[in-house]
Amino acid sequence: MIRALIGIIFVILYCIVSVPLLIVQTIRRKYNPIGAETFMLRVVQGAFRILLFICGTKVNVIGLENIPEDESVLFVGNHLSFFDIIISYSQMKTRCGYIAKDNLEHIPLLSWNMKFLFCLFLNRDDLKQGLETIKKAISYIENGISVFVFPEGTRNKTGDDTQLGPFHRGSFKIAQRTNCSIIPVSFNGTADIFEAHFPIVKKTTVTVEYGKPVPYSSLTRDEQKRIDEVFRDKIRDMVIKNS
């Protein structure tokens, strides 16, 4: 319980301290957007690493070399915990936006940080808004900003990391429309940090693996038609391997 309380206090303090940083970098963004955005990327990554340290989370990373430094890609991963975002974002080499639930958009200060760093908020009950979110994500890829999406649409709450839910095919339209590479990402054990024993945060070791980039154009016509199943199988195999 102590780890959880310290973690919450740290997040609150960070959100407060980040206000002047965001104001300065918002101004800087007008004449040096990449510099301002990269600066805030590193600041948030530092904060996330401190939070993981507070939570006693040790991260075993596999395939870090598969994250490109010179091109935008679509990351797709299984989803076990909100720590999936904290862990993977702390390892991004360049700018990357996440597609998150729209309820996060209403949290003061946190949403400002997220919007500055290209996070998109998705209302799954609003088809029109969902299409606009996908269009925005496509524009990010076209402008050199990677996008991370969890195609299951929600966290796996079964308690079994290998039981992935069905992937939503719409998530892959980002790659279809931009012809970018897709990187499968697997998470093991992240629910054991917090969700598996809410409200206690426990010291644990988790594993994240980044698969090799798969250019959309390299997929066969059949694979493109079954792209949701293809990547679900890839990620499930990675999860099983790392269990």
Image: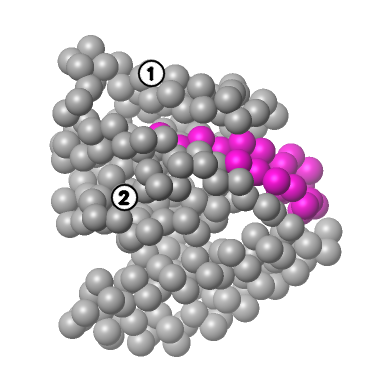
Under mark 2, the amino acid is Pro
Find residue 9 and report its horizontal and vertical position in percent.
70, 72
Q: How crowded is mark 2: few (under 14 residues within 10 Å), some or many (20 or more)?
A: some
Q: Quadrant of the N terminus?
A: bottom right
Q: Give the side of residue 200 with respect to residue 188, left or right.
A: right
Residue furthest to the right: 1
Which x, y percent locates residue 13? 62, 78
In the image, the segment drawn in magenta is 184-207
Is 100 displayed left or right of 47 in the figure? left
Give the quarter of the image for residue 36.
Answer: bottom left
Q: Which amino acid does label 1 sit on?
A: Glu
| Residue 153 seen by the camera | no
Q: Residue 68 carries which label?
A: 2
Q: Mark 1 points at which residue?
A: 229
Give the residue drawn at x 78%, y 43%: 197
Q: Residue at x 22, y 22 (%)?
A: 219
Tell me how far mark 1 sits from mark 2, CA to CA. 24 Å
Q: Residue 163 carries which label?
A: none
Among the 4 quarters of the image, the one containing residue 190: top right
**Is 45 in the magenta?**
no
Rendering colour mode = one colour
Give the secondary structure at mark 1.
Answer: helix
Q: In this view, does 15 lie to the left or right of 2?
A: left
| 219 in relation to 157, above or below | above
Q: Judge whether residue 191 is colored magenta.
A: yes
Q: Where is residue 95 in the image (x, y as percent from the top left)?
A: 33, 61
Compared with residue 223, is residue 76 higher up or lower down, i.e. above or below? Answer: below
Nearer the observer, disc 1 or disc 2? Answer: 2
Viewer-side residue, 188 vs 229:
188
Residue 77 visible in rendering: yes
